[in-house]
Image (tube, rainbow, N blue to C red):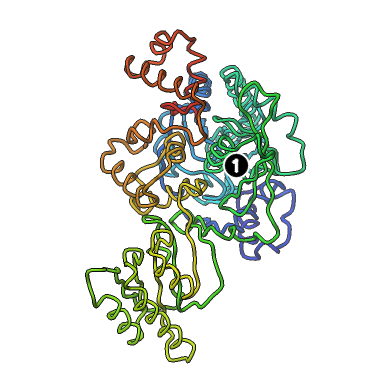
Amino acid sequence: MKPDAVRQAREALVQSGLAGPVAPSNVVPEAIERSWRRSISLSIEAGAPVPEQYEIDPETALCLAAAPVLDRWQQQLSGTPISLFLSDRAGRIVARRMGDRSQRPRLDRVHAAEGFDFSENSIGTNGLGTALVEQRPIFVQGSQHFSEFLAPLTCAAVPVMAPGGTALGAFSMGVEVQAANALILPLSKEIGHQIEQRLRSQTRPEDLALAMSFMRYKNSRRPTVVLDGQSMLANTPGVPYVSVDTHLILWELLKQHDWRRSDPAEIQLPTGAVAVGRRLAEASEQQYLVHFVVPERAATPTPGFADPRNGRGGLPVEPAAGDAQLVVIDGPPGSGRLTRAMETRPADATTDPVVVVADPSDSECLTEVDRTLGGGADVILRRVEDLDEQWADQLDRLTRRHREGVQRGDRTNTLIVTVCITSAPTRIRNVLLAAGRVERIPPLASTPQRIPGLVRGILEELDPQHRYTMTPAALQAFLEWHWPGDVREVRQTLGAVLREARATLIERRHLPAHLRQAVPRRTLSPIESAEREAIVRALAQSAGNKSAAAELLGIGRTTLYRRLRELRIDADESSL
């Protein structure tokens, strides 16, 4: 079929939209048309270049298993115009091999190189991204690519599956259209199969055990995952719930759960879903089975959690009915009360609020607030817990005057008070509880499921150029710490890490010592506490050499690695 006919079919579908007619099967295969429709629904621009480059980790299990296979086939294809590509499960290219190095400039021009995002969500129909979505071998010829940048190439791609049946990534062979041959598809299947064989041979015994557990539940009609500390396997309905953040949250909270009192465990996720988990008692290692339930009312993120995409990772509040012109934000110091206060103002507000800190040494403090409110400006009165009992009457008059002005229609502006109710004097507390709508921000220590999104949101603010990325093991360290300084401590910690960073990939070893060696959230038994101290001491004496530490402790290296994972001691970066 001539490329022009394919391009015309694609352009006709773009112009007519998703409701447009089905393209003739002799022009476009069904899988390609499905992918085009997905690309249109995602508003992918056919003329847009491949998105920006990302840091990649060459030490992942997928890369390590695939490297010798790719090297061997690069030698066998030497002198040919065929190039080999490997992507991770997110569609980012993590390895590239070329049969003819003269192909490099052509591939670089279309960003077919390590670190670039070739997922369908980014560039539409292409071999790597479409194979991951379709979960099957895909042959994409020239103009069948959604992006015009990739039209000079023909690609044959296959998903690369882990032993448990989940896709770890995709493998693709690419060649210029004029040199394409239908044999590259069966050859891609063979190379993908060889990578999968190496993955199986290198799989840890724990992963095999997890895969065996997963096989019993993979056919469930409910969204289901089976997980341990290193891996999470999902059935088809459960795939949308699979992410690094979900894995970290489930693992930490399921470990903390008191199984003697309650089985199963119910965990509220920031996305609105409820995870119902139980232990797999028959497993030799610590494993959990989790089903996901999305309440009908939770079409948006669960009440108590803001949208994680808002840049702050989802700041939970307990909403309450009341007058929108007088709001009390209750939370511990450092919990983001000022941020929440700024968001509480009406969406159509055109001027910045006047921010006043409650200063007990300034006798005119509340008088100034009253005067500003009378002038029509919005006011945020901060840290009211610092006022003592003698301020209660003046605070009561201030809130009453503002509330009455709103009720008469004389005022349309807003008064927002931030306070830690539990730290405020009794009379101050009573005035505020009676004053207006109260929104409570729980401490970070009691809502650890917030932490992954919060860390990513703050990292986005501190690093708008996206120079730094964080490994899952480093993010897990943030989950394990109890954060006595709340959100402010998270921000300060991330700021210090970025200032001292010598690499763009932030690993657990780059974090402060108290985060690296955080005691697990669950309460350790006296024996576990003593064991943990002994292991930490042995690691210090052996300068971090785990083999030497195992000898000092008189245990096997395998046993030491298992206890390191269970007690969360200096977790290996490759473990997640």
Q: Is the residue marked by circle 1 packed among few (<14), some (14-19), or many (20+) residues within 10 Å? A: some
Where residue 393 appears, x then y in whole percent?
36, 78
The quarter of the displayed image where residue 534 is located: top left
Residue 342 in sight here: no
Where residue 454 appears, x then y in whole percent?
44, 50
Q: Residue at x 49, y 62 (%)?
A: 440
Where residue 496 appears, x then y in whole percent?
28, 43
Give the answer, above or below, for where 93 lies relative to 360: above
Q: Nearer the viewer, residue 377 or 70?
A: 377
Q: Is residue 287 left or right of residue 390?
A: right
Q: Which residue is drawn at 53% across and 57% down?
A: 305
Q: Residue at x 32, y 15 (%)?
A: 541
Q: Which of 548 and 399 is in front in this view?
A: 399
Where residue 340 appears, x then y in whole percent?
43, 64
Give the answer, above or below, for where 140 lies relative to 64: below
For the image, the number of numbered tags is: 1
Q: Residue at x 63, y 56 (%)?
A: 10
Q: Is mark 1 on a helix, strand or loop?
A: loop
Q: Which of 437 and 21 is in front in this view?
A: 437
The residue singled out by tag 1 in the image is 242
Tell me the kind of residue under disc 1: Val
Residue 12 in sight here: yes
